[in-house]
């Protein structure tokens, strides 16, 4: 037994599928795995965005929020890498 998600495009009906095999009749684990795959690929997010009409101001707010979040995450990652680097003369700069 297996679960399959089929996505059909509007103009070009190409077949895109993800198949997850169900082992030992454990459907819950297979659904969890399928949801994880779809979440990583961004398919669920795209589905949620296109479920309802999004007004232009809502689109601008969402896009601006995503940009700010990306900048913040990049800055945090840079700071974390700075703190975790190993080639420093002092392991804890500023502390004596």
Image (cartoon, rainbow, N blue to C red):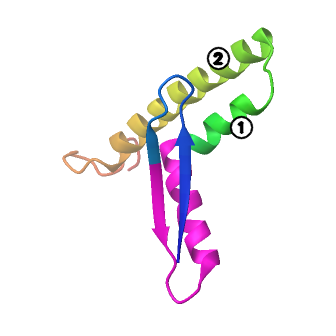
The verdict on residue 23 being magenta is yes
- How far separated are the C-alphas under marks 2 and 1? 18 Å
Label 2, residues with CA under 10 Å away: few <14, some 14-19, many ≥20: few
Considering the numbered disc 2 on the image, is that residue within a helix, a strand or a loop? helix
Numbered label attached to residue 48: 1
Label 2 belongs to which residue? 64
- What x and y, as percent, mark residue 33? 53, 66
Query: Label 1 neighbourhood size at 10 Å, few (<14), some (14-19), many (20+)?
Result: few
Q: How many marks?
A: 2
User: Horizontal and vertical percent for residue 50?
Assistant: 71, 29
Front position in the image: 76 or 5: 5
Locate residue 78, reporting x and y percent: 39, 35
- Residue drawn at point x = 52 percent, y = 28 percent: 70
The residue positioned farthest toward the top in the image shown: 56
62 is higher (above) or lower (below) than 5: above
Q: Residue furthest bottom?
A: 24
89 or 68: nearer the viewer? 68
Q: Are marks 2 and 1 in contact (CB under 8 Å)?
A: no
**Residue in the picture at 48% in, 36% down:** 76
| Left or right: 44, with 89 as reference point | right
Up the image or down, 29 lies above or below 46; here it is below
Stretch in magenta: 17-42
On whether residue 18 falls in the magenta region, the answer is yes
Residue at 60% x, 67% y: name it: 32
Residue 56 is situated, as x and y percent measured from the top left of the image, at: 76, 9
Q: Earlier in the sequence, mark 2 or mark 1?
A: 1
Q: Nearer the viewer, mark 2 or mark 1?
A: 1
| Residue ID at (41%, 48%) | 95
Mark sitting on residue 17: none
- Describe the element under mark 1 as helix, strand or loop: helix
């Amino acid at each position: 037994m297996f679960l399959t998600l089929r996505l059909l495009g509007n103009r070009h009906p190409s077949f895109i599928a993800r198949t997850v095999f169900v082992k030992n009749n454990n459907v819950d684990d297979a659904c969890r795995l399928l949801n994880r795959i779809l979440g990583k690929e961004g398919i669920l997010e795209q589905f949620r965005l296109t479920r309802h009409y999004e007004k232009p101001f809502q689109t601008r707010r969402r896009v601006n929020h995503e940009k700010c979040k990306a900048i913040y995450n990049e800055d945090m990652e840079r700071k974390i890498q700075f703190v975790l680097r190993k080639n420093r003369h002092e392991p804890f700069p500023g502390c004596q």
